[in-house]
Image (cartoon, rainbow, N blue to C red):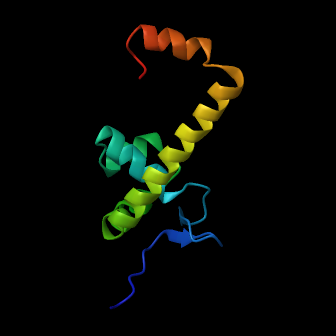
Amino acid sequence: MATAEYAHISFTAEGVPMIAGTRTKVVEIVLDHLAHGSDAREIHREFPHLPLGAIHSALAYYYDHQAEMDEDIARRLRKVKETQAELDRLQGPSPIRLKLKAMGLHP
């Protein structure tokens, strides 16, 4: 199987795909795309410092590695939930989260 190269994509020492020459992770672009249904031009408005070609490369990388990236996103979400549960255990839920929950705006 041939290895694809992606213009504008580099990898950290840990193997995290990044937009080359920036501190922007590919997963940040992907999350904007998935959460809001944003296309490359809409994402470019949110990340104006990124070339449009870099955004297209990030989306191409995601679709070529979708299962792997979806698992990474799920792992990140689990980590957030674990961290929040630990904070709740140590400090109790935050007043703002309690208010949002009472308003039906937070699970």
Residue 42 position in % (x across, y down): 34, 42
Quadrant including the N terminus: bottom left
Q: Residue at x 32, y 70 (%)?
A: 64
- Depicted 50 relative to depicted 43: above or below: below
Q: Residue at x 63, y 26 (%)?
A: 88
Name the residue furthest bottom: 1
Name the residue furthest right: 90
- Depicted 4 relative to depicted 51: above or below: below
Front residue (pair 104, 11): 104
Front residue (pair 39, 89): 89
- Depicted 2 relative to depicted 64: above or below: below
Q: Residue at x 57, y 13 (%)?
A: 96
Front residue (pair 51, 27): 27
Name the residue furthest front: 89
Asked whether the viewer can see residue 69, the reply is yes
Residue 86 position in % (x across, y down): 64, 34
Q: How many marks?
A: 0
Q: Is residue 50 found left or right of 41 in the rendered image?
A: right
Q: Residue at x 38, y 82 (%)?
A: 4
Quadrant including the C terminus: top left
Q: Is residue 2 found left or right of 13 in the rendered image?
A: left
Asked whether the viewer can see residue 48, the reply is no
Residue 34 position in % (x across, y down): 33, 46
Residue 3 position in % (x across, y down): 39, 86
